[in-house]
Image: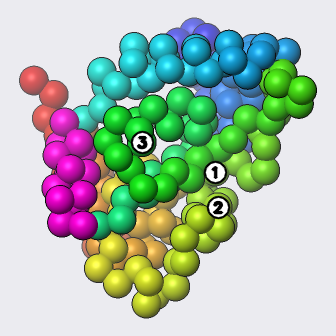
């Protein structure tokens, strides 16, 4: 549905109200937990996994080799992101959870939607985000909405496709530019 022109326009007019997440939840409302788990695994392998940037995988694996504690903080749904975390041995996952009741999807978010400052709130429930605990920490993001998270860590890295993003330079953040060939 997001590919339909109407939804692209709505997304540009109302970028912060997460209408697309609500739409997706309404589509799976009433489905069983088991069915959604199966669909999420398929979604990960068919849509998410093929589009993960190779440099990010290399960075993650390098950090794991250097004994970093790895945390994925995402506005996406934990039900499919967990497959990435399992595949790459990520230590913690902080993401948006789907609300289930009696093993059926309620079509709602459970708890906080892991977007903008809620990312920091949810992250603080998972790990200690004090300055002492985050010494030597690195965060990666492709979106300016994650600026609070990027600024929280010792080194924020903006991941860009094809060209540099102005906001990375304006905020003195490092940048990885991945060229599509």
- Confirm whether residue 41 shows in the render: yes
Closer to the camera: disc 1 or disc 2? 2
Identify the secondary structure beneath mark 1.
loop
Circle 3 crowding by C-alpha within 10 Å: few under 14, some 14–19, many from 20: some
Q: How far apart are marks 3 and 2 (CA)?
A: 17 Å
Q: How far apart are marks 1 and 2 (CA)?
A: 7 Å
Q: Is residue 104 above or below residue 124?
A: above
Identify the secondary structure beneath mark 3.
helix
Circle 3 sits on which residue?
85
Numbered label attached to residue 114: 1
**Left or right relative to 49: residue 32:** right
Mark with earlier residue (3, 2): 3
Residue at horizontal 24 percent and vertical 45 percent from the top: 56
Numbered label attached to residue 122: 2
Identify the secondary structure beneath mark 2.
helix
Q: In which quarter of the image is the N terminus?
A: top right
Tell me where residue 162 appears, x and y as whole percent.
19, 37
Name of the residue lying farthest toward the right: 102
For residue 171, what is the image quadrant?
Answer: bottom left
Q: Is residue 3 above or below residue 106?
A: above
- The reply to whether callout 1 and callout 2 are in contact (CB within 8 Å) is yes
**Of 155 and 68, which appears nearest the observer?**
68
Tell me where residue 46 appears, x and y as whole percent.
39, 13
Per the image, is 61 magenta?
yes
Circle 1 crowding by C-alpha within 10 Å: few under 14, some 14–19, many from 20: many
């Amino acid at each position: 549905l997001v590919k339909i022109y109407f939804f692209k326009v709505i997304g540009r007019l109302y970028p912060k109200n997460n209408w697309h997440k609500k739409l997706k939840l309404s589509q799976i409302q009433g489905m069983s937990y088991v069915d959604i788990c199966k669909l999420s695994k398929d979604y990960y392998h068919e849509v998410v996994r093929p589009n993960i940037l190779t440099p990010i995988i290399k960075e993650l694996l390098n950090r794991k080799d250097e004994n970093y504690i790895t945390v994925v903080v995402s506005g996406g749904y934990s039900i499919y992101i967990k497959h990435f975390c399992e595949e790459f041995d990520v230590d913690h996952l902080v993401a948006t959870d789907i609300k289930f009741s009696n093993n059926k999807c309620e079509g709602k978010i459970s708890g906080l939607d892991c977007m903008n400052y809620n990312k920091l709130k949810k992250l603080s429930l998972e790990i200690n985000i004090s300055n002492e605990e985050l010494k030597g920490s690195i965060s990666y993001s492709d979106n300016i909405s994650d600026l609070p998270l990027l600024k929280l860590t010792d080194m924020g890295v903006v991941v860009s496709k094809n060209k540099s993003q102005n906001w990375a330079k304006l905020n003195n953040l490092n940048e990885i530019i991945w060229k599509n060939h």
